[in-house]
Image (cartoon, grey):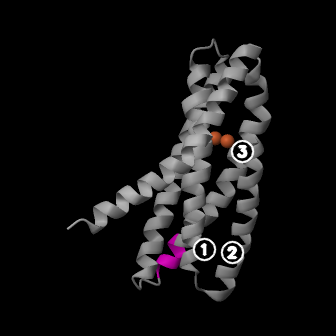
Amino acid sequence: MWEHRLIERMVAVLKVELARMASSDTVDPVAIDTAVDFFRTYADRTHHGKEEEILFRELRGKALSDEHRRIMDELLAEHVTGRREVGGLVAAKARFVEGDVSALAGIRGHLGTLVEFYPRHIEKEDRRFFHPCMAYFTKGELNAMLGEMWEFDRKMIHERYGHLVDEWETRTAP
Ligand SMILES: [Fe+2]
Ligand SMILES: [Fe+2]
């Protein structure tokens, strides 16, 4: 939930950026790249990664109520939606950089969807899922998950930059 607060701050910044785009009819491609990196590396890989690969994995082994099982399925589907919107944003920005001015509408559309989507997703997790789901675990299980989450985070920066160099090597290979 602490990570949700940083995502909310990014959403607030992007709302300002969207308003600027609307009044100037142009876009700062570097700002879009920064937003994409935040959504992919932080919000999706680091944050959704811990939800899906640790918390949801452990919850699958519990006798969840119908409501909690349904919400978990919805949350997983929403993570997929988030990835799809970021993918759309990347594609629209690429078209804009190549000179397609009409791609501006796509950038605005995907960014607009993301700034609406994330607060709703976060509210569902904060208010209707995370707190009640803690009751499925013993204190020992909660501590074990927390330890695994710290380890997940510890590896993340190495994974991020490992992939970056891998990709660059592939692009520059003779
Ligand atoms: Fe989530
Ligand atoms: Fe979350």
**Position of 29 compared to 22: left or right?**
left
> Quadrant for ligand 1?
top right
* In the foreground, 83 or 101: 83
Q: CA distance from mark 2 to mark 3?
A: 21 Å
Q: Position of residue 52 (x, y in %)?
A: 56, 33
Q: Which residue is mark 1?
A: 31
Q: Mark 2 or mark 3: which comes first in sequence?
A: 2
Q: Is residue 21 visible?
A: yes
Report if the CB atoms under discs 2 and 1 are less than 8 Å apart: yes
Residue 47 falls inside the magenta stretch: no
Camera-side mark, 3 or 1: 1
Question: Circle 1 — which element?
Answer: helix
Q: Which residue is mark 2?
A: 17
Q: Which residue is mark 3?
A: 122
Q: Is residue 160 above or below residue 50?
A: below
Q: Amino acid at mark 1?
A: Ala
Q: Quadrant of the C terminus?
A: bottom left
Q: Which residues are magenta?
A: 102-106
Q: Is residue 45 visible?
A: no
Q: Is residue 64 above or below residue 121?
A: above
Q: Position of residue 77 (x, y in %)?
A: 54, 39
Crowd rating for badge 3 (residues with CA inside 10 Å; few <14, some 14–19, many 20+): some
